[in-house]
Amino acid sequence: MRVKLIDPSAFTPPYDRALAAALAAAGAEVELITSDFLYGLVPPAEGYRVSLDFYRRTTRRAAGRAGRAHVRRMRKVSEHVPDMLRLRRGLDREPAGPDPLVTHYQWLTIPDLDRHLLSRRRPRVMTAHYILPLAPSRAARNRARRVFERMDAVIAHSRGGAERLVSEVGLPADRVRVIPHGTFDYLTRQPEELMLPPELNPGRREASARGPVILFFGLLRPYKGIDTLIEACGALDGGGEAPPELWIVGNPRMDLTELRRDAERIGIPVRWVTRFIEDEEIPEIMRQADLVVLPYHDGEQSGVLYTGIAFGKAMGVPDVGGIGEAAREHGVARVVPPGDAEALAAALAELTADEAARAALAERSAAAATGSFSWSRIAAQTLDLYRELAG
């Protein structure tokens, strides 16, 4: 089986590379066609080939310097159509060979345009990492349908996502498949690990001197409900020698002034690390956290969820999309209604006070990491789909 995984803008390099490595380990000949990722290191290629065929001039000029985002976007747009056409020509010219060839799109940069630029090579598969907003307009549903209907199969990471592809996008049910999102277990195997950032460990305290650590991790965006989390933590008991701590760690994509002001008013310590977090820093941050919390107001999937599962962490998550579905089915997290600070506060109070309850969630996370969300199982399911389509 020959597989071309395609992510022109390198939107999800950890996912792309984990899937590529798992497919290669299962015996497939895999090429990942993408662009250079400028915002940090990516997992090394293990058993598969990487072709950086998109936006080469833009990434070459941007490497090593910040540059202006709008200038990079303009340069990228100017390269996009020629790069898509080159990809199409290359795929169309691939020899038939004894093994079937599958083109598997992870993302399309400009979906409305790119659907006209796809290779004629079949079968075509696409992973629906993002399906639709919570309350989509008719135009949004139509745009999604026009893209997804060009595929022979569309992969959703949850049953809820698959149902939306059928009921809202309008795809035939037999063209939609559910294959879970895998854990980001490569983060547990970093060749070099860094110590906790000093902002999280003032005075280099021993972990035993801290109270339970509640961790929010990932890009700081409005929909992620950091305001709800801070409000919920305001209801926790800040007395005693080792009260709970809230750690908010990630690169901001929003103004934090009001959030910081609110955090100063609650009774437990709140520690901030507001910058890009390197992969080498993640293991120690995760291991020191007692509870990973995703207070999102909306969302279908989250890389933080699958990072927490990889590290075997107890978690609290919202009942949204595939996040709530995965937590309920595998028992890896306490599930609360999205945006409900009171319900979140109750869950946090219970879990920070009950070490045994946290340990039970953590045990189920560890089991899920080597079971349903393991990349070997996901590769097997994906190859089964490829074979069915090619057969």
Image: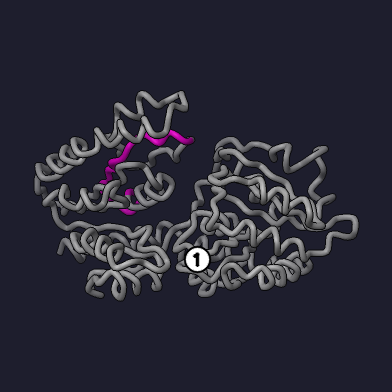
Q: Report the side of 178 relative to 338 (left or right).
A: left
Which one is in front, 98 or 241? Answer: 241
Q: Report the side of 242 relative to 10 (left or right).
A: right
Which one is in front, 142 or 331? Answer: 142
- Asked whether the viewer can see residue 230, the reply is yes
Which one is in front, 295 or 304? Answer: 295
Residue 231 falls in image quadrant: bottom right
Residue 162 falls in image quadrant: bottom left
Residue 163 falls in image quadrant: bottom left
Indicate yes or no whether the magenta region holds residue 251. no
- The residue at the point 57 percent across, 69 percent down is 338
- Does 107 sit above or below residue 274? below
Query: According to the image, label 1 marks what residue?
Result: 323
List x then y, in percent, for residue 86: 16, 37
Badge 1: residue crowd in 10 Å (few <14, some 14–19, many ≥20): many
Which one is in front, 209 or 298? Answer: 298
- The residue at the point 9 percent across, 48 percent down is 96
Image label count: 1
- The residue at the point 37 percent across, 59 percent down is 130
- The residue at the point 24 percent across, 50 percent down is 3
Which region shows up in magenta?
A: 24-39
